[in-house]
Image (cartoon, rainbow, N blue to C red):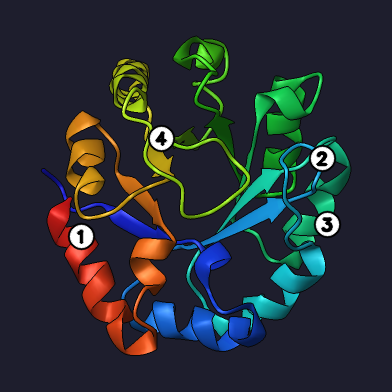
Amino acid sequence: MATPLISPSILSADFARLGEEVRAVDAAGADWIHVDVMDGHFVPNLTIGPGVVKALRPHSAKPFDVHLMIEPVDLFLEAFAAAGADIITFHPEAGPHAHRTVQAIKALGKQAGIALNPATPAKMLDYLIDDIDLVLVMSVNPGFGGQSFISSQLRKIEAVRKMIDKSGRRVHLEVDGGVDLVTAPQCVSAGADVLVAGTATFKGGPEHYAANIAALKGAG
């Protein structure tokens, strides 16, 4: 199995020290920085806005992998792009025209991702796969960190991998939710090449981040 990219979710970081935490996981070997944006409406939690993304941007040159769990999503694309997002991922349920949202993200010069909730079928991608840069399979219901992995999503990862391979395009397949040393190899075996890891990265404090990330890469 190929070594996956690791995108630590700052949702599990110490919010009193976010800048330091981003620098720490960057130095520890993170490939991307995953930023979970929640609005308390589309998902039952409230996190951060574009101002925090902008404040964190100087702390790392790694790609900012921004996952928008907000509705409506289109109103905020420009703000997150300007704040420093490199990849902007949204849920197709968060707006009336998913293809138009993809076009808007691309017009801002950013990579576009589609997030699939546990009950959202892979078929949702049929008319989007040729235009997007990333598919994010949610292996938990979005809204909170520290949830248990939903094993049925492995079949979806396999289905999405087949779609990507058939397209002939370079589209990242990312998994978010309950990723640890047990589930990471399952995800990679099913076809994922990017793993979002919050709790598994940040457990133990900064002195453990490098070992945590290395273990996830090795597990994959």
> Which structural element holds mark 2?
loop
Q: CB of mark 4 within 8 Å of CB of mark 1?
A: no
| Nearest to N terminus: mark 3 or mark 4 | 3
Q: Secondary structure at mark 4?
A: loop
Observer-side mark, 2 or 3, equals 2
Please state which of residues 155 and 6 is positioned toward the viewer in this rendering: 155
Residue kind at label 1, given as amino acid type? Lys
Neighbor class of circle 3 (other Cα within 10 Å; few <14, some 14-19, many 20+) is some
Which residue position holds label 3?
Answer: 79
Callout 1 environment at 10 Å: few (<14), some (14 to 19), or many (20+)? many
**Mark 3 to mark 4 CA distance (whole Å):** 24 Å
In the picture provided, is 81 more to the left or to the right than 219? Answer: right
As drawn, the label of residue 171 is 4
- Residue at 61% in and 81% down: 18
In the displayed structure, 128 sits above or below 70; it is above
- From the viewer's perspective, is the residue at label 4 or at label 1 nearer? 1
C-alpha distance separating marks 1 and 2: 34 Å
Q: Residues within 10 Å of mark 4 (few under 14, many from 20)?
A: many
Q: Residue flagged by tag 2: what amino acid is it?
A: His
What's under tag 3, amino acid-wise?
Ala
Left or right, residue 169 beside residue 45: left
Residue matched to label 2:
41
Residue pointed to by mark 1: 217
**Percent position of residue 112, x then y:** 60, 39
Q: Nearer the viewer, residue 120 or 51?
A: 120
